[in-house]
Amino acid sequence: MRQLSITPALHNTRLEPASTPTQALLLPSVKSSKKRTPCSANAETPTVALNGTQVAIRLTSTTVEVSHLPNFTRAANKWRNEFLPALYHVFYMSTAPFKDFVVSTPMLVARVQQLVDVVYPDVVYDVQAFNEPFHLLSYNRVNHRRASVAKSALDEVAKHVVSASAFSNNQECYQWLMWARRLDGPLFYEEPTPAWCTANRGEEGYIEPSGHFKSRFIINIARKALSFSQSATTTAFPPAPPLGLFLERAALFIQVDGTSKDVKPFSYENYGVELGDYIHH
């Protein structure tokens, strides 16, 4: 295995069949080989002090803290150094960055379980859908990562819009933003279909773009996002990373002065349809 390198070449890497434990995390069909029992070594019941005694509390996504993780996670700080980078990589690999990470669902529980089994191979631990810190903290961290990447996309587009060398007037800026909303436009391709080309793919006169996912916008936000998953040892990268969807959203809400207006939350309810179009484009 080798560490994931952050270079433009990563956009050409194909997702191969799993040949390592970490790669296996990325495939939903992979099941843990560990034998489990109802009495596996799960986390200690979280408590708080009340009137001089420790009272058990019920964890939720808003109350869970790192201190609620079981003691075995403190060895070599694997939670921060190995678990979170692997979790973020699985998130970046997903072609369903909303549905794959819904709290208290079998899909998220299974993904987190696979991560726990790989990062802590000497521990038998059952991830649960409710009142369980690994699952709840993973859900929180993915939400934070998703929001951070979305902000990076907004910042990248806004920085280009306000660049003094990019446009001579607001009309040019507006026209570029309209072009940027196209899936064959400058946000997604190194050599995009020209803005003046109005033919659809397959029609006479259409100019095919080239350099899919090699635009400087994709590379810039990927470089920043992947800095949080560099410790995840894997050779795999998705053929259609969802990072581009964040840019498409940014182009919708950035104004000609670089500000953003009426930005909708980055959720499945608001962008589920667009995600499907983007993945299959």
Image (cartoon, rainbow, N blue to C red):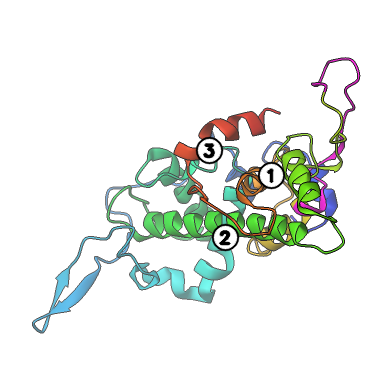
Q: Position of residue 224 (x, y in %)?
A: 69, 63
**Residue where numbered disc 1 is placed:** 244
Answer whether residue 87 is visible to the viewer in this image.
Answer: no
List x then y, in percent, for residue 79.
50, 67
* Mark 2: secondary structure: helix
Rendering quarter of residue 150: bottom right
Q: How many marks?
A: 3
- Judged left or right of residue 260, residue 220 is right
Q: Is residue 207 magenta?
A: yes
Location of the N terminus (image quadrant):
bottom right
Of helix, strand and loop, which mostly describes the magenta segment?
loop
Which residue in the protein does label 3 denote? 271
Side of 173 relative to 106 (left or right): right
Disc 2 marks which amino acid? Ser
Q: Give the labeled residue for mark 2.
A: 148
Say if residue 54 shows up in the picture: yes
The amino acid type of the residue labelled 3 equals Tyr
> 96 or 85: which is nearer to us?
96
Mark 3 / mark 2, whichever is N-terminal: 2
Range of magenta residues: 199-217
Q: Characterize the local packing of mark 3: few (<14), some (14-19) or many (20 or more) Cα atoms within 10 angstroms.
A: some
CA distance separating discs 1 and 3: 13 Å
Is residue 104 magenta-colored? no
The percent position of residue 130, horizontal first and vertical second, equals 28, 50
The structure residue drawn at horizontal position 73% and vertical position 35%, both measured from the top left corner, is: 182
Do tag 1 and tag 3 residues touch (Cβ < 8 Å)? Answer: no
Q: Closer to us: mark 3 or mark 2?
A: 3
Which mark sits nearer the N-terminus, 1 or 3? 1
> What is the CA distance from the residue labelled 1 to the residue labelled 2?
14 Å
Where is residue 248 drawn, in percent x and y?
A: 66, 43
Q: Residue at x 66, y 33 (%)?
A: 278
- Residue occupying image coordinates x 10% and y 84%: 52
